[in-house]
Image (tube, rainbow, N blue to C red):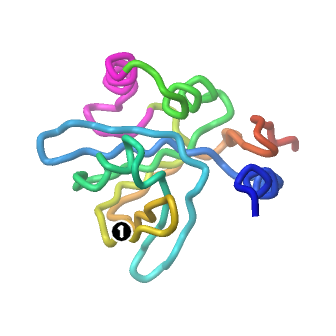
Amino acid sequence: MDSKHFRKVFGQFATGVTVIVGTDDQGERTALTATSFNTVSLDPPLVVFSVKKNGYAGVKFRECRVFVINVLAEDHRELSDLFGRPSDASVRQAALDSMMESGVARLAGALAALHCEPFMTQEVGDHALFVVRVTDAAFNEGRKPLLFFSSEYRKLLE
């Protein structure tokens, strides 16, 4: 099956949008936008996300000892774009530093933030699956999520 067709097929599945921030032992942060995120287990609390295994984040995330998965609100579209597209590393780092809440990799205003540690990594096809154990989590009620459907951002209507 053609990969472009396969991508369009899965574009028919609406997802939330996350920015995942990984921090290595030296305190260096790497971040990317991901819509491929899901729960795996409640006991122990595990979630999974996938990234291109040979991409920048796929390589850097293997060195990370801490991850924070930030679930984006509808007003976070610019953040999603910043970490979802290739851009200057210094611009990304400056944005990351300015968005952090009290030095933690939690994005200000995120609908939810899951603090995680590595559990296992598995290469599958052209992606790496990162299964991470949730060690702490917080959420904010009353805001709407940023949604992605058919290669476009969408809004939740009530």
Q: Is residue 151 left or right of residue 108?
A: right
Question: Toward the viewer: 44 or 14?
Answer: 14
On the image, the x and y values in percent for residue 67 come to 33, 52
Given the image, on which type of amino acid does mark 1 rest?
Answer: Thr
- Which residue corresponds to mark 1? 121
Residue 100 drawn in magenta: yes
Residue drawn 30% across and 64% down?
Answer: 118
Q: Residue furthest left?
A: 26
Q: Is residue 44 left or right of residue 143?
A: left
Residue drawn 42% across and 67% down?
Answer: 123
Magenta residues span 89-107
Residue 81 drawn in magenta: no
Q: Residue furthest right?
A: 158
On the image, the x and y values in percent for residue 137 come to 42, 57
Q: Estimate how packed mark 1 is, as few (under 14), some (14 to 19) or many (20 or more) residues with alpha carbons within 10 Å.
A: some
Residue 1 higher or lower than 145, as above or below: below
Residue drawn 67% across and 42% down?
Answer: 142
Q: Residue furthest front?
A: 2
Residue drawn 68% across and 33% down?
Answer: 74
